[in-house]
Image (spheres, rainbow, N blue to C red):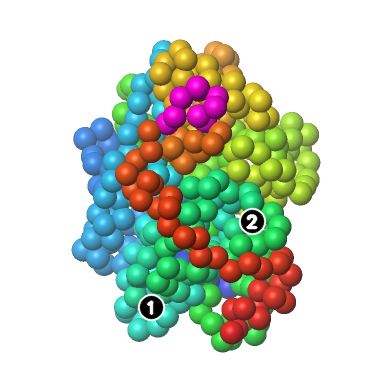
Amino acid sequence: MKFYSTNKKAPLASFQEAVFKGLPEDNGLYMPENIPVLPSSFFDSLEVMTFSEIAFEVIKSFSEDEIPVNALKEIVQNAFNFETEVVHLHDQVYALELFHGPTLAFKDYGARFMARVMSYFLQEKAKEAHILVATSGDTGSAVAQGFYKMPGIQVTLLYPKGKVSKIQERQLTTVGENVTALEVEGTFDDCQKLVKTAFVDKELNEKMNLSSANSINIARLIPQSLYYFHAFRLVAAQNEKVLFSTPSGNFGNLSGGLLAQKMGLPINHFVAATNINKIVPEYLKTGLFEPKPSISTISNAMDVGNPSNFVRILDLFDGDYEAIKKHISGIYFDDESTKNVIKEVARKYDYVMCPHTAIGYGALVNKMEEPGSKPGVFLGTASPAKFGDVVNPVIGREVDIPKRLLEIVNRPKNAISMNADFSSFKEYLLS
């Protein structure tokens, strides 16, 4: 399969080229030339398929001419070797828990798959790659763990100083080996701009084999469609469609859900659940997409003022505003409302959520008040243990911290301080 740029001004790329380039030359995002509609036999068997079997069939439809069947099966089994749980919370409300991987966040799916795909291709080409990642929290730690000690791959993580949780920062800055963390004076948007600018810098690309592991990379997008299939098979009755509420920052997760829908998954509707960085909810209300400087919130992984993957959503619907509104609703929560959701759900159902997950739940319940909006699934994007500084005071007790998080809390931070000026970043990379 070939992949085109959303800006339509770059040459078509193979799957391998799209994975390693990250961004096309025209600064768009890669999308599959044809989104494959999965056969009825796949959906007939979905109920009895394992997660790995679903992953293999979905990913194969995008990469089968470049990755042999046996190699892809091995990649999939190694990448997704942890549980993906669906919890019935109440009524027809379900939590899709995506935080049982190594870093306790949904981004383990895309990062672990991408690392193994890149490693496979690099072995074939005997080349090295340098991964650049902008992170508002969980992406960086997932990429760090996913690419840790992967041969032929160097990783540079850029995160905004003072705008990630303490545990997130430890996950970013204590990995070592082939992973380096840069603490940037600025916001996530500043970090993202540095990475994007690097990918279109001619001198850098002549001297380095740069690639991205952010959700802008197609190898991150495709795996983020998988758990929608998994949740659907556990929640939906025959001839039923499902409502999904997706906590949204850079909008890769929602783009993955839309991809699953385009592949034939019977999804009723999506809710783009955001914090006060409500760029997309405002677009869905007014038809105007107006990026703004990001605002810091307790749901920091969603503090994005110019979501990169929004262009993919436009592309999927050919820019048709009315079609987008038909498939997606936008709901946002401020910090106080988010805390209220965390507190109420913990009290009523003894279920503790991170701030991002709480926004997904709140938005889902809001939307389910409309007729024909059941059953509903909200995405649990990160373990509440990663946000104890927010969650513990709200619920009046301490969240249990998994052993693998406890092990890193006291490790010394190792990060390089940097301003948000591109010339400084470029000088660092070239050195």
- Separation of residues labelled 1 and 2 (CA atoms): 27 Å
Q: Quadrant of the N terminus?
A: bottom left
> Is the residue 338 above or below the residue 25 in the image?
above
> Is the residue 415 above or below the residue 325 in the image?
below
Q: State left or right for residue 272 relative to residue 49.
A: right
Q: Which residue is mark 2?
A: 160
Q: Which residue is mark 1?
A: 152
> Is the residue 410 above or below the residue 297 in the image?
below
Q: Position of residue 99 (x, y in %)?
A: 39, 41
Residue drawn at 25 percent across, 47 percent down: 53
Q: Nearer the viewer, mark 1 or mark 2?
A: 2
Q: Is residue 89 magenta?
A: no
Amino acid type of the residue tagged 1 in the rendering: Gly
Residue drawn at 29 percent across, 41 percent down: 83
Q: How many marks are shown on the rendered structure?
A: 2
Magenta stretch in the rendered image: 391-399
Residue drawn at 57 percent across, 30 percent down: 359
